[in-house]
Amino acid sequence: MSGKIFACVTAVIGAAALTLATMIGLVQGTILAVSIANLSLRILAVATDILFGTLLLLGCIYLATHLAVHILGVGQADFPPLPEDTNRADLPKN
């Protein structure tokens, strides 16, 4: 039980640190991208920064949820049953 708590705390701190580091890097990259004098290179740098930033932040989210699923063990849970299929045409009219 103690190991699971340690793993949970470590995963949360690691995910927060990774996200913070990503955000700091993206802000620095954006500052550098908008300071480029050549307009076409600036547009390319900002577009690349947006694309790369989106991929990095999605990777952080994926890693955090992936770790949470593995630590908590909810990946082996049974899929809940689907609700009954009711057709509105079968319902009695008032």
Image (spheres, rainbow, N blue to C red):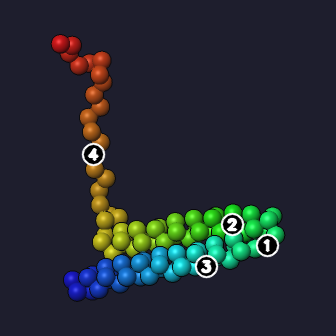
* Dot 1 or dot 4, earlier in sequence: 1
**Left or right: 5 as drawn, with respect to 23:** left
Q: Amino acid at mark 3?
A: Gln
Q: Is residue 93 above or below residue 80?
A: above
Q: CA distance from mark 2 to mark 1?
A: 13 Å
Q: Amino acid at mark 2?
A: Val
Residue topped by disc 3:
28
Disc 3 element:
helix
Residue topped by disc 2:
46
Kindly indicate whether the residue at mark 3 contacts the one at mark 1 (C-beta within 8 angstroms): no
Q: Amino acid at mark 4?
A: Pro
Look at 52% across and 69% down and name the residue there.
57
Residue topped by disc 4:
81
Q: CA distance from mark 4 to mark 3?
A: 48 Å
What is the crowding at mark 2: few (fewer than 14 residues within 10 Å), some, or many (at least 20)? some
- Percent x, y of residue 46: 69, 66
Nearest to the eye among marks 4 and 3: give it. 3
Q: CA distance from mark 3 to mark 2?
A: 12 Å
- Percent x, y of residue 45: 72, 69
Kindly indicate whether the residue at mark 3 contacts the one at mark 4 (C-beta within 8 angstroms): no
